[in-house]
Image (tube, grey):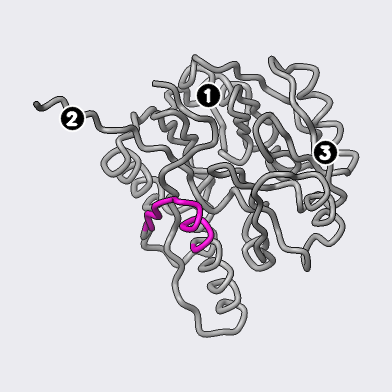
């Protein structure tokens, strides 16, 4: 089947408990806006209740890498609730008809925030949270796509904090030295060529490209980069406030798993 790159049918998100303090209410408001925007982009939302009071349960991207009907389940970070992994597996397998693959190598380390899929190939950031064995697990799970490990400079964060997909064959990258060095390493190893959109603020680099629409942070949070998006992007885009959610993660991509559910073919006459 010919899949359109970056076209999704569902978004898996975590339920957020309603807080009583002002800070929690602000987070809840931003999260509701985030989910509402995904719905407006023709995504069906599946909320997962992981039965935990931990604030980082909303960060789902580290639990699985999902691509073209296959879900590679990842080992949760120390301290992460086991309920989250079990709930995600159940939803991906039983609700969204994804083929589940689990990492068998006991030495493999891999987080979804270290895995960048461009629509044509995978890059895996090699750092404290993901290693070469983890990159090999991605390559084995998705053999139809090239998979390249990229060394992340010591002391720096996940690859998706600095580089994400901003359109078909377009990479959005921060202007910092760290982000640009990471981009150069990717360009040297890449199988395909990409256009790059450089944004002044690194926190603007984490975007979502969903169903032909680019989602980025609001002008109040990234004023200089917002101007770049306005000037350089000539297709549909939406902006969203993300300041409270950003305190729990590295960006927009962290709080959902985007999935394309395989079409069910009815062969009955």
Q: Residue at x 62, y 60 (%)?
A: 248
SS for callout 1: helix
Q: Which segment did they paint magenta? A: 36-48
Q: Is residue 173 magenta?
A: no
Measure the C-alpha gap from mark 1 to mark 2: 32 Å
Residue at far left of view: 269
Select label 2 or label 3 by which is in front: 2
Q: Which residue is mark 2?
A: 266
Say whether disc 1 or disc 3 marks the residue closer to the N-terminus. Answer: 1
The residue most toward the right is 177
Q: Residue at x 54, y 30 (%)?
A: 5
Real-space Cα distance between discs 1 and 3? 23 Å
Residue 150 position, x and y percent, is 72, 25
Along the horizontal axis of the image, is 225 left or right of 32?
right
Q: State the quadrant of the N terminus.
A: top left
At horizontal 62% and vertical 22% (from top left) the residue drawn is 132
Mark 1 lies on residue: 138
Which residue bears the numbered disc 3?
179
Q: Going by the image, does 197 lie left or right of 9?
A: right
Which is nearer the N-term, disc 1 or disc 2?
1
Q: Is residue 38 magenta?
A: yes
SS state under label 3: helix
């Amino acid at each position: 089947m010919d899949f359109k790159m970056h076209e999704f049918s569902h978004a898996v998100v975590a339920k957020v408990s309603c807080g009583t303090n002002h800070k929690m209410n602000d987070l809840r408001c931003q999260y509701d806006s985030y989910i509402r925007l995904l719905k407006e982009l023709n995504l069906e939302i599946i909320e997962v209740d992981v039965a935990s009071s931990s604030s980082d349960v909303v960060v789902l991207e580290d639990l699985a890498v999902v691509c073209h009907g296959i879900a590679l389940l990842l080992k949760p970070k120390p301290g992460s609730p086991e309920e989250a992994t079990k709930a995600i597996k159940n939803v991906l397998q039983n609700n969204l008809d994804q083929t589940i693959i689990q990492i068998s190598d006991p030495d493999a380390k891999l987080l979804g925030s270290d895995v960048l899929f461009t629509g044509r190939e995978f890059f895996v950031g090699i750092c404290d949270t993901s290693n070469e064995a983890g990159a090999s697990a991605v390559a084995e799970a998705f053999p139809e796509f090239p998979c390249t490990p990229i060394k992340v400079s010591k002391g720096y964060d996940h690859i998706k904090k600095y580089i994400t997909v901003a359109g078909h064959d377009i990479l959005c990258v921060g202007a910092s030295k760290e982000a640009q060095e990471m981009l150069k390493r990717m360009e040297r190893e890449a199988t395909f060529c990409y256009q790059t959109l450089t944004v002044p603020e690194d926190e603007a680099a984490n975007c979502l490209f969903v169903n032909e629409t680019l989602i980025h942070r609001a002008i109040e949070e990234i004023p200089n980069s917002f101007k770049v998006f306005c000037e350089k992007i000539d297709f549909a885009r939406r902006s969203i406030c993300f300041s409270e959610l950003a305190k729990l993660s590295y960006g927009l991509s962290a709080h959902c798993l985007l999935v394309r559910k395989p079409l069910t073919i009815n062969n009955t006459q």
